[in-house]
Image (spheres, rainbow, N blue to C red):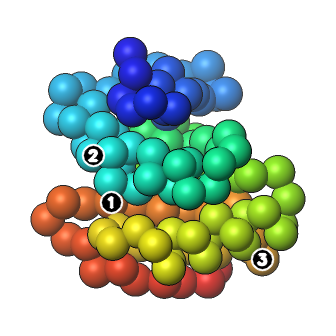
Amino acid sequence: MQLSKNFSLDELCVANSGLPNLPNQEQINALTDLCTHVLQPLRDLYGKPIHINSGFRSALVNKSVGGVASSEHRFGRAADLDAGSIEENEKLFNLIKDNIPAYRQLINERGFSWVHVSYNKNDNKKQNLKL
C-alpha cells in the first residue's frame, strides 16, 4: 500500500525483530499524515531516496528496541531517517527545519547518525532537539 508517491506502508513498518508489527487503521492514518506532510515534501526537496530505519512500532517491537511506551513511533507518528552519511543526515535535518511548515519534533540523534521526525496533526510545535 502506497502512503505517498515515494513511501509505502511496508517500508514504514519494517521490524527486524521478527515480532508482529502491523498497524491498525488509526495508525495507518497517522503514517499517511506523516508521509503527506513531512516525508514526501522532504523527499521532493532532497531529490534522492531516504531510508526509513524505523517507522511504526508495535508495543512489542517498541519494547524490544528500548523505546519508551509513549513513543510517537507507537502511534504511527514518527520515523527515523537515514540518507547514508552524517553529512547527508544533517542536510535532511536542515531541510526539514527550514522548509517543512509543520512537524512535532525533529531530533539530531547521536551526531546525525540518523534523524528522528514526528508529525501530529493536533500538536506540531516544531521542537528541535539534539540527543
Label 3, residues with CA under 10 Å away: few <14, some 14-19, many ≥20? some
The C terminus lies in which quarter of the figure? bottom right
Which residue of the protein is positioned furthest toward the top in this rendering? 1
The N terminus lies in which quarter of the figure? top left
Residue 33 is tagged as: 2
Pointers 1 and 3 in contact (CB under 8 A)? Answer: no
Amino acid type, callout 1 = Tyr
- Earlier residue among tags 1 and 3: 3
Residue 127 is tagged as: none
Label 1, residues with CA under 10 Å away: few <14, some 14-19, many ≥20? many
Q: Could you say where residue 43 lies in the image, as x and y percent from the top left? A: 55, 48
What residue did someone put label 3 on? 111
Vertical placement of residue 71 versus 90, above or below: above
Q: Could you say where residue 19 lies in the image, as x and y percent from the top left? A: 54, 22
Q: Residue at x 26, y 72 (%)?
A: 124
Q: Could you say where residue 120 lies in the image, as x and y percent from the top left? A: 25, 60
Q: Could you say where residue 68 lies in the image, as x and y percent from the top left? A: 44, 60
Is 130 positioned to the left or the right of 103 in the image?
Answer: right
Is 96 positioned to the left or the right of 125 in the image?
Answer: right
Q: Nearer the viewer, mark 3 or mark 2?
A: 2
Q: Nearer the viewer, residue 51 or 20?
A: 51
On the question of residue 25 being in view, the answer is: yes
Amino acid type, callout 2 = Asp
Query: Secondary structure beneath disc 3?
Result: loop
Vertical placement of residue 15 versus 96, above or below: above
Query: Secondary structure beneath disc 2?
Result: helix
